[in-house]
Image: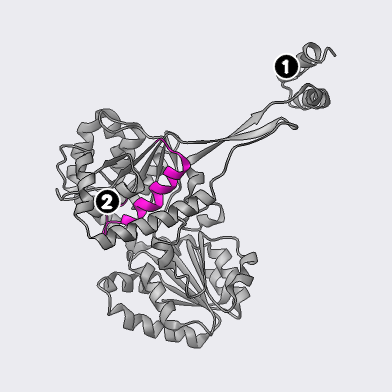
C-alpha cells in the first residue's frame, strides 16, 4: 500500500490518476484488440454496439452475445418455469439468508419512502409517482452478484415500479445461475433476461423485437457498461456511473488491526482495481495492519486479486488526529467509510462526502454489502460529493402542483409582470395581465 503522510501530502499527489489505473487501461486495450482485431477506445466500441443494435435489433444482439460472451442464445428472456424451479436447486440455508436480507432491505426502503403532499392554503404541493419500467443490471463477471439483485430490484418494487426487469449475462453457453434466479423470485422481479455487457444496456435503452425499452437503467458494471450508460443517458434515465469498489477505514490506536486488515481485504478481493484505504493516527496500528494483510491474504482463495489491489491501488495515510482523518474522507469522498474509532458518533456532524457510513467494529462494511438494509450500490470515484446510494428515490418522479387562488393571484401578478418584462418576454407579461383583467377584473 502506498504510504502518505497527512492531508497536505495527499492533496499534492492525489489526482484522478490514483483512481484510474494504468493496469486497467492496458488490460482493456488488450481485450479490445483480442476481440475486434484492432485498436479502439472504449467509447468507439460502445458507439459501434449502439449503432448495430439500433439498426439490426435482435440479430445484432445475438451476434454480439456470441462474440463478446461466447453464448449462442436462442431466447433472451428466462422462462417463468426456470425461475420458479431455481428455488429447488439451491440450499434452504441460502434461501433463508436471501429472505432475511430481502426483509431488511424492504424495511429500510419503506422507512425512507417519500409521499405526495399538498398545502391547500398555499396552493402548492408535490405528486410522487413511480417510474413505469426499470432495468436492474446484475454483473456476471468473476462471481455472480446475487446480492445486487436484492439491492436494486427491491427498492424499485417498494417504490411502486410497475415492471421491474433484471438482466444478468450467461457466458460460454452456460445455464442461468439458479442463485440469481432465486434472488429475482424472492425480490418480486417481473421479468428476467440473460444478456449482459454494453450490448444489454443498449438493447434495453433502445428496445428491440424481443427486448422491452425501459425508462431507467440501474446497477453497477464494468467499464463498457459504464460507458454505454453515458451514451444512452437521455434516451433513458440512469442511476449513476460506477467505477471499482472503494473502501476507507478510519481507525484510531484502539482499533483492532485484524478487523482493519480483514475489512480492507474484503473490498480488495472484488477485483484488482478496487481502491482500499486505511487512515489512522497510529503508526503502530498502520504497521500492524500491513503485517496482518500479508497473513490474511494467504487464507483466502482470491488472495492474488486482493493482493494486487492492495499493492497497486491501496493507500495507508498517517494523520495527526481523527479530525484530520475526517478531512481526508471529505476530500476523497469514498464509496464506503468505516469509523473504527472511539465514540464514532461524534464525528458524524463533520462528514459530508461519502456513499455509506459504517460506525464501529460491529458494523462491518461486509454487513452492509449483504444484509444491513441500505442498498450496496453507492457512488464511486468521488461522485459521493454530489450523489447518493441507490434507494427508492431513484425510482420516483417528483411532480410539483400549482393551484393558486384568486387572492394569491392578486398579490403575485404584478411581480410576475415585472419579472417577465425584465426578461423581455412580453408574452409572459401579457398572460399575467390578462388574468388580472379577466379573473380579478383589474
Tell me what residue is drawn at x 41 percent, y 35 percent: 162
Residue 262 versus residue 419 in the image, above or below = below
Query: Dividing the picture into quarters, in which one does residue 76 lie?
Result: top left
Q: Specify the farthest residue to the bottom.
A: 284
Instruction: Write down the quadrant of residue 164 in the picture.
Output: top left
x, y percent for residue 225? 34, 47
Circle 1: element type: helix
Q: Quadrant of the C terminus?
A: top right
User: Badge 2: few (under 14), some or many (20 or more) residues near its Cα, within 10 Å?
Assistant: many
Give the extent of the magenta segment: 138-162
Name the one closer to the observer, 39 or 290: 290
Q: Is residue 94 left or right of residue 410?
A: left
- The secondary element bearing badge 2 is classed as helix
Q: Which residue is mark 1?
A: 431
Question: Where residue 209 appears, x then y in whole percent?
Answer: 25, 28
Q: Is residue 179 magenta?
A: no
Rendered position, 39 above or below 202: below
Distance between mark 1 and mark 2 Cα atoms: 58 Å
Q: Which residue is mark 2?
A: 182
Percent position of residue 96, x then y: 31, 59
Q: Is residue 161 magenta?
A: yes
Q: Is residue 9 above or below residue 70?
A: below
Amino acid at each position: 500500500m502506498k504510504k502518505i503522510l497527512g492531508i497536505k501530502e495527499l492533496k499534492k499527489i492525489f489526482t484522478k490518476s490514483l483512481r484510474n489505473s494504468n493496469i486497467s487501461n492496458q488490460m482493456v486495450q488488450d481485450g479490445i484488440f483480442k476481440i475486434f482485431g484492432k485498436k479502439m477506445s472504449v467509447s468507439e466500441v460502445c458507439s459501434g454496439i449502439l449503432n448495430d443494435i439500433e439498426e439490426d435489433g435482435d440479430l445484432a444482439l445475438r451476434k454480439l452475445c456470441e462474440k463478446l460472451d461466447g453464448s449462442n442464445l436462442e431466447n433472451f428472456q428466462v422462462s417463468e418455469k426456470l425461475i420458479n424451479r431455481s428455488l429447488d436447486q439451491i440450499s434452504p440455508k441460502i434461501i433463508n439468508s436471501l429472505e432475511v436480507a430481502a426483509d431488511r432491505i424492504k424495511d429500510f426502503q419503506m422507512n425512507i419512502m417519500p409521499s405526495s403532499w399538498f398545502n391547500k392554503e398555499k396552493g402548492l404541493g408535490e405528486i410522487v409517482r413511480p417510474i413505469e419500467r426499470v432495468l436492474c443490471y446484475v454483473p456476471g463477471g468473476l462471481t455472480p452478484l446475487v446480492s445486487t439483485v436484492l439491492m436494486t430490484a427491491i427498492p424499485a418494487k417498494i417504490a411502486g415500479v410497475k415492471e421491474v426487469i433484471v438482466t444478468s449475462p450467461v457466458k460460454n453457453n452456460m445455464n442461468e445461475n439458479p442463485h440469481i434466479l432465486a434472488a429475482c423470485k424472492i425480490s418480486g422481479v417481473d421479468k428476467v433476461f440473460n444478456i449482459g455487457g454494453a450490448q444489454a444496456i443498449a438493447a434495453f435503452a433502445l428496445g428491440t423485437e424481443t427486448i422491452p425499452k425501459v425508462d431507467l437503467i440501474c446497477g453497477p458494471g464494468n467499464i463498457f457498461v459504464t460507458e454505454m450508460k453515458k451514451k444512452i443517458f437521455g434516451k433513458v434515465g440512469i442511476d449513476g456511473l460506477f467505477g471499482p469498489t472503494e473502501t476507507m477505514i478510519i481507525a484510531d490506536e484502539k482499533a483492532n488491526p485484524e478487523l482493519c486488515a480483514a475489512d480492507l481485504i474484503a473490498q480488495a478481493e472484488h477485483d484488482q482495481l478496487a481502491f482500499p484505504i486505511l487512515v489512522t493516527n497510529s503508526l503502530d496500528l498502520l504497521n500492524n495492519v500491513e503485517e496482518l494483510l500479508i497473513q490474511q491474504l494467504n487464507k483466502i482463495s482470491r488472495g492474488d486479486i486482493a493482493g494486487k489491489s492492495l499493492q497497486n491501488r491501496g493507500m495507508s495515510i498517517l494523520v495527526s488526529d481523527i479530525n484530520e482523518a475526517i478531512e481526508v474522507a471529505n476530500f476523497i469522498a469514498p464509496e464506503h467509510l468505516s469509523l473504527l474509532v472511539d465514540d464514532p458518533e461524534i464525528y458524524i456532524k463533520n462528514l459530508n462526502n461519502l456513499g455509506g457510513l459504517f460506525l464501529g467494529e460491529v458494523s462491518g462494511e461486509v454487513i452492509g454489502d449483504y444484509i444491513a438494509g441500505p442498498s450496496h450500490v453507492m457512488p464511486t470515484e468521488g461522485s459521493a460529493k454530489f450523489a447518493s446510494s441507490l434507494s427508492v428515490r431513484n425510482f420516483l418522479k417528483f411532480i410539483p402542483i400549482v393551484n393558486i387562488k384568486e387572492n394569491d393571484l392578486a398579490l403575485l401578478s404584478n411581480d410576475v409582470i415585472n419579472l417577465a418584462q425584465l426578461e423581455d418576454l412580453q408574452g409572459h407579461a401579457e398572460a399575467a395581465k390578462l388574468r388580472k383583467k379577466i379573473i380579478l377584473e383589474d
